[in-house]
Image: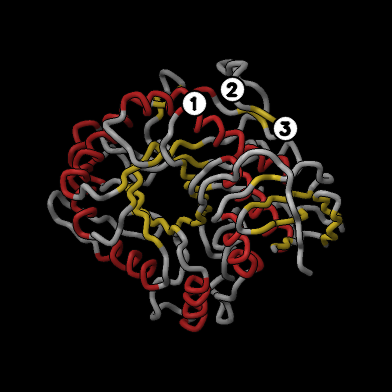
Amino acid sequence: MVLVLRLTAAGPPSPRFSYGFDFAEQGPYTSTEPNAPAVASARRVLSSIPGMYEATPIMYWGLPDPEPAPGRFDLSAIAGRVRLITSTGGIPVVTLCGAPGWMKNGTGPNVAPTPEHYQDFATLAAKIARAFPEVKYFVVWNEFKGFWSTADNNWDIKGYTTMYNDVYRAIKRVRPDAWVGGPYATTPPLATPGRRNLPSTPHGPWGYLDQRTLDAIRYWLANKAGADFLAVDGRDYPHTGPITSPLAATEKYAATTVWLRQQSQLPIWWMESHIQPPGSGWSDNQAAAIRVAALVQMASSGARVGMQWQPEQGATSDDDAGLWTSTRSPDGGQPTVLARILPGVLEVLGRGVRIVPGQPPGVLVASGPGGTIALNTTTAAATAVVNGTRVPLGPGQVRTS
C-alpha cells in the first residue's frame, strides 16, 4: 500500500537525524568465534544499514584493560571493534569509559578515576584518539559512573567536569578535528515529583525528570572547556516500572530534548534509550514499532542522534529489540523485524519529520520531506488518520511511504 499524505501542520521539520547503537558484550566481533555462520550473517545485517553511529567503550563490556600498567598500552581490542564498524559501513564512536584499575580505588565500570589520575585518563584518551584517526567522535565517560556524592545525595558534577575538561583539552591537542562530547548524563524518569523538583521540571504521563540531573547538565554546560555535542541517555519508564502506555512513555524523549535545546545549541545525542521493561511481553512487531516511535520523538524534537543499547537480540534479559538474532545459536544472526524496517524509517527520519496530531491511542504518524511513517504500538488493529486519509494498521505494524 502506498500512502499519499499531504500535511498542513505548521512549522519546519526537525534537522537531520541519525540512528545508532552501543556495542556491548555480545556481537559479531570475529569470524573465529563459535557459530561463525551466525556471526557472518550478523555482519551482513550491519552492512545492510550503512551510516549507523556505532559506539564502543574502551574497556569493560567485552573489552580488556587498554593500559594495564602506566605507559603500557594494548589497544588491539579497541582496534578490532573499530575495524568491525568501519568494515560494515558504520560510523565509529568511542566512549571513553571505563578506567584502568591503577587509576582508581576499586574495580568495575562503575568506579571513576581518582582526581590525581584525571590527567592519566586524559593521556590515555589522547593516545586512543591519535591511534584511530578514522574515529571522529569521542564521548567522555558514561552516565556519571562513580561520580556520585553520598554525602550530598547528588552528582559530583564538579569532579566529572574537571575530568572532562582534562580529556577534552588532551584530545584537542592531538586531534583538533575530533568531536568531543559529554556529559552522558542519565535521565530516567521519576514516578512522582521529587522533593528537589521545581515546577518547571519537564514532566508528563511518563513521569518527572530528576532536578539533580538537570542541574548537573547546566553546571557542565557552564563550566566545560568546550564541547562539540551534548550527550545524554535514559530509559522512558521509572525504575519501579511503567506508569503509562508504551507510546506515551516515548514522549519523554521529546520533552527532554526540548529542554536540552533550551539550554544549549549543541547537537543533542541520545547515547542509549531503553524502552522495553523486563517482562513486557511485547511481540517482535510491537517492540519494533515502539522503538521507531522513540526515534520519531527524538527526531521530531530536534535531536541529531538516537542510539540504543546492544544490537544483538536477547544478549541479556533486559535488552530492547535488537537488529539480529543471537549469534549464540548456529542459525542466529538473522535480521529482526526492526532491522528489516529501519532502512525505510531512517530514510524518512534522516530528512526531518513532524508528528501529525489527532491519532487514536497507541498510533503515531510523522511526516516530512523524506516521506511518512505511520505506526501502531498496540496489540489490536488500528487506523491512522492524516488529513482525512484513513490508513489501516495491524498490531505492531509500521508503514513508511
Q: Which amino acid lies under the numbered mark 1 shown in the image of this protein? A: Leu
Residue that sits furthest to the bottom in the current view:
37
Residue 309 placement (x, y as % from top left): 51, 54
The chosen color scheme is secondary structure
Q: Is 289 rendered above or below residue 194?
A: below
Is residue 384 shown left or right of residue 78? right
Q: How many other residues sit within 10 Å of disc 3, few (<14), some (14-19) or many (≥20)?
A: some
Q: Quadrant of the N terminus?
A: bottom right
- Disc 1 element: helix
Q: Quadrant of residue 103?
A: top left
Q: Residue at x 74, y 44 (%)?
A: 8
- Disc 3 element: loop
- Disc 2 element: loop
Q: Label 3 belongs to which residue?
A: 205
Q: Quadrant of residue 286?
A: bottom right
Q: Is 366 rendered above or below residue 226?
A: below
Q: Is 321 rendered above or below residue 235?
A: below
Q: Earlier in the sequence, mark 2 or mark 1?
A: 2
Q: Do residues under tags 2 and 1 come within 8 Å of each other at their CB atoms?
A: yes
Q: How many other residues sit within 10 Å of disc 2, few (<14), some (14-19) or many (≥20)?
A: some
Q: Residue at x 43, y 59 (%)?
A: 54
Residue 40 placement (x, y as % from top left): 47, 80
Q: Residue at x 64, y 54 (%)?
A: 291
Residue 214, disc: 1
Residue 201, disc: 2
Q: Which amino acid lies under the numbered mark 3 shown in the image of this protein? A: Pro
Q: Do residues under tags 2 and 3 come within 8 Å of each other at their CB atoms?
A: no
Residue 136 placement (x, y as % from top left): 31, 54
In this view, the residue in front, 215 or 318, is 215
Q: Earlier in the sequence, mark 3 or mark 1?
A: 3
Task: Decide if residue 239 is in sight here.
Answer: no
Q: Which amino acid lies under the numbered mark 2 shown in the image of this protein? A: Thr
